[in-house]
Protein backbone atom coordinates (compact mmCIF):
# COMPACT_ATOMS: atom_id res chain seq x y z
CA UNK A 1 0.00 0.00 0.00
CA UNK A 2 1.58 3.22 -1.14
CA UNK A 3 1.25 6.28 1.09
CA UNK A 4 -0.34 8.86 -1.18
CA UNK A 5 -1.56 12.44 -1.09
CA UNK A 6 -4.70 13.53 -2.88
CA UNK A 7 -6.58 16.77 -3.46
CA UNK A 8 -10.21 16.99 -2.34
CA UNK A 9 -12.57 19.91 -2.98
CA UNK A 10 -15.93 20.51 -1.37
CA UNK A 11 -17.35 22.26 -4.41
CA UNK A 12 -19.42 25.48 -4.28
CA UNK A 13 -22.70 23.56 -3.97
CA UNK A 14 -21.41 21.77 -0.86
CA UNK A 15 -20.37 25.02 0.84
CA UNK A 16 -23.61 26.77 -0.16
CA UNK A 17 -25.73 23.86 1.09
CA UNK A 18 -23.96 23.76 4.45
CA UNK A 19 -22.57 20.29 3.75
CA UNK A 20 -18.85 21.10 4.05
CA UNK A 21 -18.64 19.64 7.56
CA UNK A 22 -20.55 16.50 6.56
CA UNK A 23 -18.29 15.94 3.56
CA UNK A 24 -15.08 16.60 5.51
CA UNK A 25 -16.29 14.31 8.29
CA UNK A 26 -16.87 11.38 5.92
CA UNK A 27 -13.27 11.60 4.74
CA UNK A 28 -11.89 12.27 8.22
CA UNK A 29 -13.54 9.13 9.60
CA UNK A 30 -11.71 6.88 7.13
CA UNK A 31 -8.45 7.52 8.99
CA UNK A 32 -6.84 9.45 6.16
CA UNK A 33 -4.80 12.28 7.67
CA UNK A 34 -5.74 15.89 6.97
CA UNK A 35 -2.55 17.56 5.73
CA UNK A 36 -3.92 20.88 4.44
CA UNK A 37 -7.29 22.66 4.43
CA UNK A 38 -8.63 26.08 3.47
CA UNK A 39 -11.72 27.95 2.26
CA UNK A 40 -10.90 29.69 -1.00
CA UNK A 41 -12.36 31.33 -4.08
CA UNK A 42 -11.19 29.50 -7.24
CA UNK A 43 -9.99 32.00 -9.86
CA UNK A 44 -10.66 31.64 -13.57
CA UNK A 45 -6.97 30.85 -14.09
CA UNK A 46 -6.90 28.13 -11.43
CA UNK A 47 -10.18 26.64 -12.72
CA UNK A 48 -8.90 26.34 -16.29
CA UNK A 49 -5.64 24.76 -15.12
CA UNK A 50 -7.40 22.36 -12.76
CA UNK A 51 -9.95 21.25 -15.37
CA UNK A 52 -7.63 21.43 -18.44
CA UNK A 53 -8.45 17.81 -19.40
CA UNK A 54 -12.11 18.79 -19.97
CA UNK A 55 -11.44 21.83 -22.20
CA UNK A 56 -13.57 21.53 -25.35
CA UNK A 57 -16.20 19.20 -23.88
CA UNK A 58 -19.85 20.36 -23.96
CA UNK A 59 -20.08 20.68 -20.17
CA UNK A 60 -16.77 22.60 -19.84
CA UNK A 61 -18.12 26.19 -19.80
CA UNK A 62 -20.71 25.26 -17.16
CA UNK A 63 -18.07 23.45 -15.13
CA UNK A 64 -15.73 26.46 -15.08
CA UNK A 65 -18.54 28.85 -14.26
CA UNK A 66 -19.76 26.53 -11.45
CA UNK A 67 -16.37 25.99 -9.78
CA UNK A 68 -15.64 29.74 -9.79
CA UNK A 69 -19.17 30.75 -8.67
CA UNK A 70 -18.65 30.60 -4.89
CA UNK A 71 -15.95 29.41 -2.46
CA UNK A 72 -14.73 25.84 -2.16
CA UNK A 73 -13.08 24.04 0.73
CA UNK A 74 -9.81 22.61 -0.55
CA UNK A 75 -7.98 19.91 1.36
CA UNK A 76 -5.14 17.47 1.04
CA UNK A 77 -5.60 14.01 2.53
CA UNK A 78 -2.77 11.58 3.08
CA UNK A 79 -2.57 7.86 3.76
CA UNK A 80 -2.35 4.38 2.25
CA UNK A 81 -4.15 4.35 -1.12
CA UNK A 82 -5.53 7.82 -0.38
CA UNK A 83 -6.48 8.46 -4.03
CA UNK A 84 -8.61 5.33 -4.42
CA UNK A 85 -10.07 5.61 -0.92
CA UNK A 86 -11.25 9.17 -1.55
CA UNK A 87 -12.81 8.20 -4.91
CA UNK A 88 -14.66 5.33 -3.21
CA UNK A 89 -16.08 7.62 -0.51
CA UNK A 90 -17.12 10.17 -3.18
CA UNK A 91 -18.96 7.74 -5.44
CA UNK A 92 -19.03 7.87 -9.25
CA UNK A 93 -19.48 11.14 -11.16
CA UNK A 94 -23.22 10.74 -11.86
CA UNK A 95 -25.12 10.87 -8.55
CA UNK A 96 -27.93 8.61 -9.83
CA UNK A 97 -25.35 5.88 -10.37
CA UNK A 98 -23.33 6.54 -7.22
CA UNK A 99 -23.72 3.83 -4.59
CA UNK A 100 -25.69 4.51 -1.41
CA UNK A 101 -23.28 5.33 1.38
CA UNK A 102 -21.15 7.51 -0.89
CA UNK A 103 -21.23 11.30 -0.74
CA UNK A 104 -22.65 11.68 -4.24
CA UNK A 105 -25.00 8.73 -3.80
CA UNK A 106 -26.43 10.06 -0.55
CA UNK A 107 -26.32 13.83 -0.97
CA UNK A 108 -26.52 14.76 -4.67
CA UNK A 109 -28.88 14.32 -7.66
CA UNK A 110 -27.20 16.16 -10.55
CA UNK A 111 -23.84 15.53 -12.25
CA UNK A 112 -23.28 19.29 -12.54
CA UNK A 113 -23.80 19.67 -8.77
CA UNK A 114 -22.01 16.59 -7.45
CA UNK A 115 -20.55 18.23 -4.34
CA UNK A 116 -17.02 16.95 -4.33
CA UNK A 117 -13.80 16.59 -6.31
CA UNK A 118 -11.06 14.03 -5.71
CA UNK A 119 -7.91 13.52 -7.77
CA UNK A 120 -8.29 10.63 -10.23
CA UNK A 121 -4.74 9.21 -10.22
CA UNK A 122 -1.21 9.80 -8.90
CA UNK A 123 -0.19 12.21 -11.68
CA UNK A 124 -3.36 14.29 -11.26
CA UNK A 125 -2.98 14.27 -7.48
CA UNK A 126 0.57 15.63 -7.60
CA UNK A 127 -0.42 18.29 -10.13
CA UNK A 128 -3.62 19.32 -8.32
CA UNK A 129 -2.05 19.45 -4.83
CA UNK A 130 0.59 21.77 -6.34
CA UNK A 131 -2.07 23.95 -7.97
CA UNK A 132 -4.10 24.47 -4.80
CA UNK A 133 -1.48 24.43 -2.03
CA UNK A 134 1.99 25.83 -1.45
CA UNK A 135 4.42 23.52 0.31
CA UNK A 136 4.28 25.61 3.51
CA UNK A 137 0.48 25.14 3.68
CA UNK A 138 0.94 21.38 4.01
CA UNK A 139 1.55 20.43 7.63
CA UNK A 140 3.70 17.48 8.60
CA UNK A 141 2.67 15.89 11.89
CA UNK A 142 1.93 12.55 13.50
CA UNK A 143 -1.21 11.60 15.37
CA UNK A 144 -0.89 9.70 18.63
CA UNK A 145 -2.97 6.86 17.18
CA UNK A 146 -1.26 6.36 13.79
CA UNK A 147 -0.50 2.72 14.61
CA UNK A 148 -4.19 2.05 15.26
CA UNK A 149 -5.03 3.33 11.78
CA UNK A 150 -2.07 2.09 9.71
CA UNK A 151 -0.17 -1.06 10.65
CA UNK A 152 3.45 -0.27 11.40
CA UNK A 153 2.97 3.52 11.33
P1 LIG B 1 -15.05 13.36 -11.53
O1 LIG B 1 -15.39 14.66 -10.83
O2 LIG B 1 -15.86 12.21 -11.00
O3 LIG B 1 -13.57 13.09 -11.56
P2 LIG B 1 -14.79 14.11 -14.34
O4 LIG B 1 -13.35 14.40 -14.05
O5 LIG B 1 -15.07 13.22 -15.48
O6 LIG B 1 -15.52 13.52 -13.05
O7 LIG B 1 -15.56 15.47 -14.60
C1 LIG B 1 -15.31 16.60 -13.77
C2 LIG B 1 -16.63 17.21 -13.41
O8 LIG B 1 -17.27 17.69 -14.58
C3 LIG B 1 -17.63 16.23 -12.79
O9 LIG B 1 -17.47 16.11 -11.41
C4 LIG B 1 -18.94 16.85 -13.15
C5 LIG B 1 -18.68 17.50 -14.50
N1 LIG B 1 -19.09 16.60 -15.59
C6 LIG B 1 -18.43 15.55 -16.08
N2 LIG B 1 -19.08 14.97 -17.08
C7 LIG B 1 -20.22 15.69 -17.24
C8 LIG B 1 -21.32 15.61 -18.10
N3 LIG B 1 -21.40 14.67 -19.06
N4 LIG B 1 -22.31 16.53 -17.96
C9 LIG B 1 -22.24 17.49 -17.02
N5 LIG B 1 -21.21 17.62 -16.16
C10 LIG B 1 -20.21 16.74 -16.26
MG1 LIG C 1 -12.00 14.06 -12.54
Image (tube, rainbow, N blue to C red):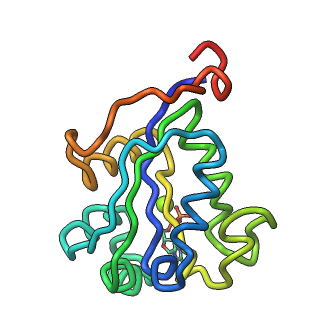
| Residue drawn where x is 63% and y is 60% of the image | 90
Quarter of the image where the N terminus is located: top right
The residue at the point 50 percent across, 29 percent down is 143
Residue 27: percent from the left, percent from the top?
A: 59, 52
Left or right, residue 137 beside residue 85: left
- Residue 140: give x, y in percent of width and height: 34, 31
At a point 74% along the width and 73% down the height, the residue shown is 106
Q: Position of residue 105 (x, y in %)?
A: 73, 71
Q: Is residue 70 left or right of residue 150?
A: left
Q: How many marks?
A: 0
Figure check: 113 above or below 79 = below
Measuring from the top left, give residue 9's x and y in whole percent.
Answer: 44, 63
- Quarter holding the C terminus? top right
Is 111 above or below relative to 129?
below
Nearest the eye: 26 or 67: 26
- Give the farthest residue toward the top: 152
Closest to the observer, 81 or 54 = 81
Answer with left or right where residue 118 lies relative to residue 96. Answer: left
- The residue lying furthest to the right in this view is 100
Figure quadrant of residue 107: bottom right
Identify the residue at image location x=78%, y=63%: 101
Amino acid sequence: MAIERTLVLVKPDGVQRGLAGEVISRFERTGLRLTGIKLMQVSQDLATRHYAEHNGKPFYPGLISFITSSPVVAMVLEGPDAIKTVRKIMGVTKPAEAAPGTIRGDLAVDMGRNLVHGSANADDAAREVGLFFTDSELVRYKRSNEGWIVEGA
